[in-house]
Image (cartoon, rainbow, N blue to C red):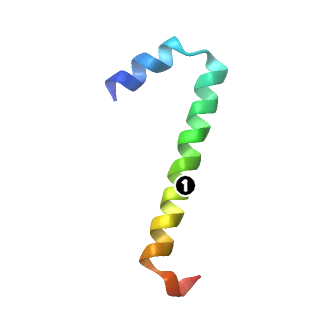
Amino acid sequence: MGPVDIHVKIMAPQDVLKTSQTVIHIQENLLLFITNKASPLEQ
């Protein structure tokens, strides 16, 4: 978590927001992917 904090301080605020949204988007997609893999019959 340390390097991420340092990187965020260097970045511009709008870039931080964009990066955060991207990370959240990736996590949501990963969660959906894992959920679909775990229970394919519920689609």
* Rendered position, 37 above or below 17: below
User: Is residue 6 shown above or below 33?
Assistant: above
Q: Amino acid at mark 1?
A: Glu
Q: Position of residue 25 (x, y in %)?
A: 59, 48
Q: Residue furthest bottom?
A: 41
In the rendered image, the residue lying farthest to the left is 2
Relative vertical location of residue 24 with respect to residue 30 in this rendering, above or below: above
Percent x, y of residue 31: 49, 60
Q: Residue furthest right?
A: 14
Measuring from the top left, give residue 41's x and y in whole percent: 52, 87
Q: Position of residue 7 (x, y in %)?
A: 45, 19
Name the residue at 53% across, 41% down: 23
Q: Label 1: which residue?
A: 28
- Quarter of the image for the N terminus: give it: top left
Q: Residue at x 41, y 25 (%)?
A: 4
Query: At numbered mark 1, what does the secondary structure look like: helix, strand or loop?
Result: helix
